[in-house]
Amino acid sequence: MKQIIILILFISIFTGCEVNKKKPGSEKKTDEIKTTVINNKTDKKVDSVLALMTLKEKIGQMNQYTGFWEVTGPAPDKGEKAKRYEQLKEGLIGSMLNVTGVDEVRKVQKIVVEESRLGIPLIIGYDVIHGYKTLSPIPLAESASWDLEAIKKSAKVAALEASATGINWTFAPMIDISRDARWGRVMEGAGEDPYLGSKIAYARIKGFQGEDLSAENTVAACAKHFAAYGFAEAGREYNTADIGTSTLYNIVLPPFRAAVRADVKTFMNSFNELNGIPATGNKFLQREILKGAWNFKGFVISDWSSIGEMITHGYAKDGKQAAELAVNAGSDMDMESVVYIRFLETLVKEGKVDEKLIDDAVRRILKVKFELGLFDDPYKYCDLEREKQIIGSKENNDAVLDMAKRSIVLLKNENKLLPLKKQGLNIALIGPLANDKNSPLGSWRAAADENSAISVLEGLQKYTGNKIVHKKGVRLVDGKATFVNELHINTTDRTGFTEAIKAAKNKDVVIMVLGEYAFQTGEGRSRTSIDLPGLQQELLEEIYKVNKNIVLVLMNGRPLAITWADEHIPAIVESWHLGTQSGNAIAQVLYGDYNPAGKLPMTFPRSLGQIPIYYNHKNTGRPTLQSPEMVFWSHYSDESNDPLYEFGYGLSYTTFKYDHLKLSKLKFSKDEEIEVSVRLTNTGEIKGEEVVQMYIRDLVGSVTRPVRELKGFEKVSLKAGETKTVTFKINAETLQFYTGNSKWEVEPGDFDIWIGGNSDADLKASFTVVE
Ligand code: NOJ
């Protein structure tokens, strides 16, 4: 019987014949609900499969479980797991996550393909956030490169490795804008700016999905978390997001819009509520905006148990209602809440959920499976030979090393302390992270082996001309920290201080590697302090007392408040969590074999109390001091309003000069396009790269506009003494915003424009837009 069904299925697939009698475009469209329009061959194939499915099987496609038993071992014979195993055989699971490796994926796929009635292959998802086994820098670090080609390539390498191990879907990129360094997940995003965030979202999706999704080396991407997860109040993980329309449209949504333009295949909704409605049950976000206005054709997966959590939010009274709310709101696949599989069938029978919505969700899911080529060959990602060849290859390591170097930001370099001489120096290398082979992997390390990163010590040791003494100085973490356990930071044991201080004395230079342990960042890792954790600040100050010639290398997943270090330490290098090749990249920068060119994608505050602090803030009605003794203006009485390091900031071993800012027209209509150009000169002695940034301010708006907004950037490479002219275009797309009319439009009026190497650029011009 099963064979016959499979035969029908495949005949219909290959002939493209419509088993389902529905006509193209015949689905009902209401104001609120727009279902997939059948418009191409794949859609016809999808419909043919759909026609063969029972309601239960359809709902099965909407059900995703995590890897639940050692699939390479014997199947469980009792309990919840055994039930899931049976569901696999009955075709009641559409997707699995956390099943990795060709062997395991093949086994689980085989159960479904060979034993379930229709044999519809599983889509296999995994959190391939910045690589699979060979890790790139964390996404926040990559974003500091402002290098879209490199970022795209990094995602491509991640896809290459992931797909070689059976995975065909990554839960990345995370494109949540965030202005709060307390939030642990800022490490996973592109920082605070919607323009940069949109460009990076686009690049990463193109990198993961490639030109041809059905190729064996590409994976489906997932734009997450829809929406406003990065606006969790007080930076506390999973907290409420309450934001206005202008912030939602102008700041939060643009990267998601860019993701749809990049043809991202899936979206993930989020844990948080937005303005009182959990994102998972949010019809406005998912049906009106995403599937309606943006016409998104892929599918939406919930976040892990986020459908069930609508009960805890106080939005659904039980699992059944949660399922009803989620599916009606547009959540197509249930990740681990186990409520779709339990309740949807009854909900349809009771008329609470329209079966058309189930069909729509399943169509979307099947379509992605078709596009991945899983119907042609469910085992196409399961080639053991390929897995062996690709994972951890030299090419992949070279690629992540390149990305790691591009991600480093030089924050301070007084008296040209850097780069270091390669010969004859006596160096003390100090700090808990100096020989840490684990922290550079970050907390989203996918399948990377523990301690598989090159440490700074190892990287530096490749340069043999100097003498290095290494001392840890202090322990950062007590006990063994893992992905799931709560960290204990050492705040009492200073026993390592003495030998570190001794080692630092009389050395030509001290390199201190300080920052955050891997598992202090990422999901579930919000902090109320953004200082150097534990005893590291104290250690830094003690070492400084005996040797002021310090290069501070920071390893962290979020902006830190390092105001003391900025005042005292002559050289500071932001290295983030750089992935597998971390130590090699850092060593090449410290020795000048690579000239750093990274720019901050997120503002570094002077102190925690300034958070949320971001460059594209509003002006307020009282932005400046009226007279010296007046207190009635927007400020703090104990801290400046300025950040420590502004968005877009970063130094180089060379210097750049900007001049000749010119506009092709100073007055133009809102449908015209003009050009703005600037001359950039490398005024130093070595070759370098500079990210030329264009900021615009719309002086008057129906909704107040930020003091500056990034509207263009270009990374330029210049030889010593070389000059280049960089040109940007300004048109309606550059100037439009979500206005008081609830529309994206340009409002005529006066604008200021700045071009320079950071968000404080002072080379300025003005222009006027007329009707
Ligand atoms: C929860 C996270 O929020 C999400 O980003 C991730 O993809 C899922 N867990 C699956 O691991």
Image: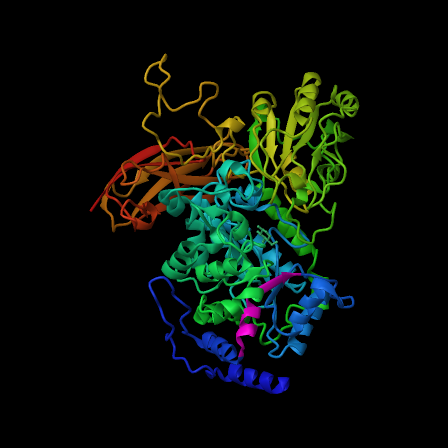
Q: How many marks?
A: 0
Q: Is residue 519 above or below residue 69?
A: above
Residue 693, visible in the rendered structure: yes
Residue 417 or residue 442, whichever sits in front: 442
Which residue is pictured at 70% across the width and 63% down the height?
Answer: 81
Residue 264, visible in the rendered structure: no
- Residue 294 at what x, y percent from top left? 39, 59
Residue 97 or residue 459, whichever sits in front: 97
Residue 95 or residue 195, whichever sits in front: 95
- Residue 43 at what x, y percent from top left? 46, 74
Task: Describe residue 730's horizontal placement relative to residue 714 as left or right.
Answer: left
Q: Is residue 631 above or below residue 584?
A: above
Among the 4 quarters of the image, the one containing residue 618: top left
Q: Is residue 64 magenta?
A: yes
Residue furthest to the left: 771
Q: Is residue 273 above or below residue 165?
A: above
Task: Describe residue 599's horizontal placement relative to residue 426 as left or right.
Answer: left
Which residue is pictured at 52% across the width and 34% down the height?
Answer: 650
Residue furthest to the top: 629
Residue range in magenta is 53-66
